[in-house]
Amino acid sequence: MTENKVKKGGFTMVEVVIALAVVVIVSVTAIAIVSSSITAGIVSENKTRAQNFAESAWEAFKVSANNEDFEKNLEFAGGVDVTYSSENDTYTYTYTSEKYKFTATITVNFTASPKQFKVVAVDNDGDEIISLSYEKN
Amino acid sequence: MKKIKNILKSKRGIALENAILFLITTFTLCALLTTFTLIGRYQSNIENTVLKRKVAVEQIGEDFVAGKLKATDAYDNYSYVKSTEGNKEILKVFHESNTSKILLYVELSVNEGAVIVTKWQYNPSVDPSESNSNTTSTAATTVTATTTATTVTTQTTTAVATTTASST
């Protein structure tokens, strides 16, 4: 018959090491999942913002007869600079959103027939988020 | 709740089954978070595709109104059918892979050279050209209702004006 020994001294070193290893593995996995989820969520939000911007620019082009109308109808988020350059009657507007990490370039030509519109939005890595072209008569 | 308090207060640590329960809870929450993120990402991609499709389809409609429709294969992934009924010109735009579902229905009325867009409908559930008579009567009803409403407003204004005049 073996004699039953009652432990009074707490855990052994091996038990503590195993328990710590389990805690570390679980924590690291959970933190990695949460972190990547948050990053992916932010990227999705930025993409959606860029898409919304491209869509609102397109809608502004559709209801505008000339550059003045277009600038009036464009709705930019406050505090962000819009620069434009004119070359061969083609106006280029660049919109950079620091908060949502994208840059959108809008090219419009209201003197051409048909009137032309193009918007390209890229993220900070230069990857294209959306590109739209449209012509109206 | 009391049980959880007791577990946390215990100086002997927690039982293995409780530890497993906490692990499962943690990973369930992580899985939930990941699921929501993936849904958001998926939704964002869908929005992107929908917007591109909307622009492409609207371009075909715009070209139709301007009388500058290109050959049907010039529009990537989209095809169209153009027809004429009396003084009406009708355009139906389809996706190349599914020609039974109309993506855009445009109806133009041509009177002595003047072109009026009488209908511009996205994703109609039924072909509007097949239910044209119903639509016309609905439109007529709407016009009547509007006229009545305008008359009522005018009467109210007159009444107010009269009251004001009598009070002064």
Image (tube, helix red, strand yellow):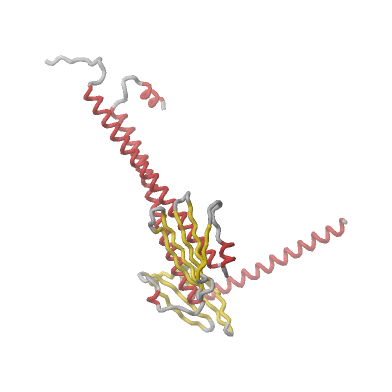
Q: Please, is residue A31 above or below residue B130 in the view?
A: above
Q: Is residue B43 above or below residue B96?
A: above
In the displayed structure, B130 sits above or below B5; it is below
Which quadrant of the rendered structure holds the C terminus of chain B?
bottom right
- Residue B24 placed where, x, y %? 32, 36
- The number of numbered badges drawn on the structure is 0
Q: What is the quadrant of residue B158 in the picture? A: bottom right
Q: Residue B100: image x %, image y %?
A: 39, 71
**Residue located 45% across and 74% down the image:** B92
Looking at the image, residue B54 sits to the left or right of residue B153; the answer is left
View extreme (left): residue = A1
Q: Position of residue A42 (x, y in %)?
A: 42, 48
Q: Nearer the viewer, residue A43 or A118?
A: A118
Q: Quadrant of residue B135?
A: bottom right
Q: Nearer the viewer, residue B14 or A16?
A: A16
- Given residues B87 and A74, the one toward you in this image is A74
Q: Nearer the viewer, residue B32 or B136?
A: B32
- In the image, is B17 to the left or to the right of A68? left
Q: Give residue B101's position: percent from left, percent from top.
A: 41, 69
Question: If the image is split into quadrants, where does the N terminus of chain B sit?
Answer: top left
